[in-house]
Amino acid sequence: MPDKVDLFVDGIKIEHFISYQIDADLYTPADAFLLEIANPKTGITPGVMCELYINEERELTGIIDKIQRKAGKSGVSLFVEGRDFMGLLVDSYCETFPDVSAMKNKALAELLLANVPFINRKDILYQEGVVGKKKGKNTRASGGFIFGTDTAQPIGHIDAGKTIFEVLKEYASSRGLLFYCQPDGKLVFGRPLSKGSPEFTLQLLKDGRGNNVLESDVTYDISRRYSKVTVIGQQQGKETLEGVTHINTSYSKTDGEFPFYKPFVTIDNNDGESPKERARMIMERQRREGTQLIYKVARHSQNGLNWAFNRMCHVRDEVQGINGDYLIYGRTFALSKESGPVTTLSLGEPGVIN
C-alpha cells in the first residue's frame, strides 16, 4: 500500500501538494523543510505552524519562514520553506543574563524557554543513562526521563550575544549529550543509540533478489577524524591564604581504528566531569562524519514503520562490501513528479563510546 501523507498548515489540511523535502538529523540543529503546493485554496503566511503526517505519524513539526508564489501557464504554485522548532532557539537570543551557577540542565532549559512560543516545556525529553543499554527495554530513544548526569554545573553566567540554542548546547555538550528536535516537535537532551536489534533492513545484492535499495553512496573520510581527543579544563578550587586555587582537569580518548597518530585538543572549563563526557561526544561525532553511508529507497516506510533517525538498521550491500548493523543518523522524505515518494537515509557507526 502507498504511504498516506497529510499536510496541515495552521491546523488547516492542505490538498494538492506537488513536491516536498523534509529533513531530520541528529546532528543538525534546525532541520529544514520545503513544500510545493498547487493552487492553494487557503492563505498561507510565514510564522504559522506546519505539520506533516505520514501513515498517521507526525514526521514534521515546524514553523514556516518563507513563502514564494510562482505563476505560469500551468497555474499557480506556492513554495513553503521553514525549519523545525529548534529553528526558534537557533534564532532567539538570550535577553536576560541571570546567575546560573549550580543550575541543572533541566532548570536552565525551563528558564530560557519560558518565553519561546510553540514549545511545550513539559514535553522536553531528558534521556536517562545511555540510550540503548536499558535491559529489557525497547532501544528506541523515547520517554521523558531525567537523565542521571543532570548534575549542577558551575558555569556562572550567560554571555550577551549568545542564542538560546548555543547556551543549552554548551550545557549539554559538557555532559556528553546532544540537543536536538524530534519530528513530533519535542526537544531532546540525549545520546545516539549505541546498540539494539535492527528495526529496518537495507539490501543490495548482486543477483537482485530482495533488493530494496535504489542508490547507495558510501564515503570514508579521515580528514576530520583524529586518533586522540583530549579535553582540558581549569576550575576554581577553594580559597587559600595565597588566593584562589585552580584545579586542572584533563581527559583523553583514543580511536584504535585510526591509521596514524593525529591529536585533537580542546578546552572545557565547566567542571571535573566535563572533559571525559566532552571527549567521548567529540569522538562520536568525528566517527559519524568519517563513515557515511547514504542510501535511497522507495516510499517512506518499511514493514509498517516510517523510516526514522536514531534507529538501528541492518545493511547487507554486496556491491559496496558492507554487512552489519548501523545507526540511522538522518533521513529525508521527498516527493517529486519524476521519482515519486523516496527516502534518503544517512547511516554510520552506532554512538556512545564507553
Image (tube, rainbow, N blue to C red):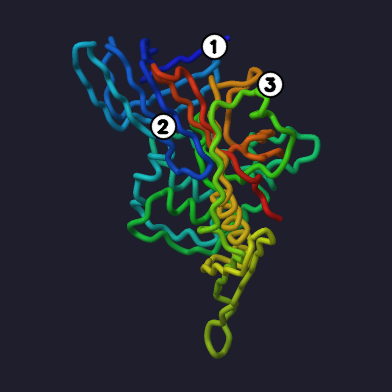
Extreme residue in the left direction: 72
Write down the residue under mark 3: 209
Q: Secondary structure at mark 1?
A: loop
Residue, x 50% and y 50% (percent of image)? 108
Identify the residue position indicated by label 2 in the image: 118
Q: Residue furthest right?
A: 136
Query: What amino acid is found at the position of numbered circle 3 in the picture?
Result: Arg
Q: Is the residue marked by circle 1 packed among few (<14), some (14-19), or many (20+) residues within 10 Å? A: few
Residue pictured at 39% horizontal, 45% vertical: 90
Residue 122 location, quadrant: top right
Q: Nearer the viewer, residue 214 or 73?
A: 214
Q: Position of residue 244 (x, y in %)?
A: 53, 82
Label 3, residues with CA under 10 Å away: few <14, some 14-19, many ≥20: few
**Disc number placed over residue 192 in the picture, else none:** none
Compared to residue 231, the image places residue 205 above or below, namely above
**Which badge, 3 or 2, is on the more N-terminal residue?**
2
Amino acid type at circle 2 is Phe
User: In the image, which disc is placed on residue 2?
Assistant: 1
Mark 3 vs mark 1: in front: 3
Which badge, 2 or 1, is on the more N-terminal residue?
1
Q: Which residue of the protein is positioned furthest toward the front in this rendering?
A: 207
Q: Quadrant of residue 45?
A: top left
In the image: residue 241, left or right of residue 143: left
What's the residue at 55%, 16% (across, down)? 55
Q: Which kind of residue does numbered mark 1 sit on?
A: Pro
Q: Quadrant of residue 32?
A: top left
